[in-house]
Image (cartoon, helix red, strand yellow):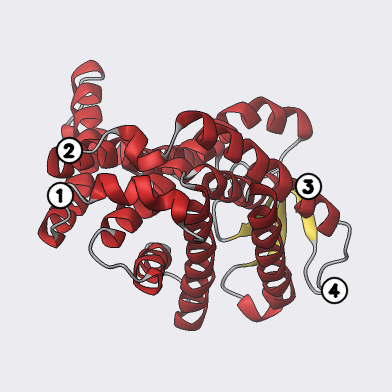
Amino acid sequence: MAYARFAPMISAASERPAIWRLVAGGASAALLLIAWLFAIALVLSLTEDTTVSRALSAVTQGDPETPEGALKYLLIVGGLGFSTLLAARLWHGRGALSLTGPAARTLRHFVIAAALTLGVAAVLMVIPGPQDVSIERNMELSVWLGWLPFALFAIAAQTGAEEVFFRGYLQSQIAARFARPLIWLTFPAFAFGLAHFSPALPPETAWAYVGFASLFGLLAGDLTARTGSIGAGWGFHFANNTIAVAIIAVDGTITGLGLFRSTVGIERLSELSPWILADLGALVLVWLLLRRVLD
């Protein structure tokens, strides 16, 4: 059975599988994240003698073209992991390992998936990109190396949080109510894609980005179900975001931590389409390799 290893996570979700609990859990995760941000703002307002609203702006707002602003954004998303763990405990009585899978397996698969993804990416980077799109230095190497440990930690937190919520929690809870993988794989994947919708982009670009993210969510969900932990999906996700955030950032996204950046922004999707197609091909290739390596 292809998804036999996913059974323990589904079993844990089956203890309290009601859909209303899932809705309450998702809402609670979001509210707990907001509460955490307000708590940080309150502490800042008391220690720096400023208003809570100004402190909240300092916590939540930042320029993603600066290292500080990029880190702030990633770490805010990273808080979703902790809020999901609390919500799952509150509404479903689930412990952390029921959302992640066995710790040793999660860590091992994370390392394997991240290494394989980065290895494939390194090979593909020698292939010339579109002629109309060039790469320019975004940060001096010495400065970038100084920020790199913080960037990797923040990317690990951000991707880990998303994997815990969308794959570890949402996917397993839906699987506890609906036996067909078509349902419990595709719904969290599309929800993951919608979470990446940006109204600031042109509509065709924004929805193409949703489609790309949904495909990634589907592949990561399959890896989670096949391996019985979020480790493979997390490593896959971490490596992809490390490339996009810390190595070659696309103008108009999070560029503050990138060593290089493209000269064409994400809003000019047609000019980036050769890269997008290459990325899609690389995603599928890595997914197929991971399915074979981790079986």
Residue ID for mark 4: 131
Residue ID for mark 1: 16
Viewed as shown, does residue 267 lie left or right of 92?
right
Viewed as shown, does residue 162 lie left or right of 292?
left
Residue ID for mark 2: 93
Amino acid residing under circle 2: Gly
Question: SS at mark 3?
Answer: helix
Marks 2/1: CA distance?
8 Å
Which residue is located at x 85 percent, y 54 percent?
123
Amino acid residing under circle 1: Arg
The one nearer the camera, 6 or 163, is 6
Marks 4/1: CA distance?
55 Å
Mark 3 vs mark 1: which is more N-terminal? 1
**Dot 3 crowding, Cα within 10 Å, few <14, some 14–19, many 20+:** few
**Image depth: mark 2 or mark 3 in front:** 2
**Dot 2 crowding, Cα within 10 Å, few <14, some 14–19, many 20+:** some
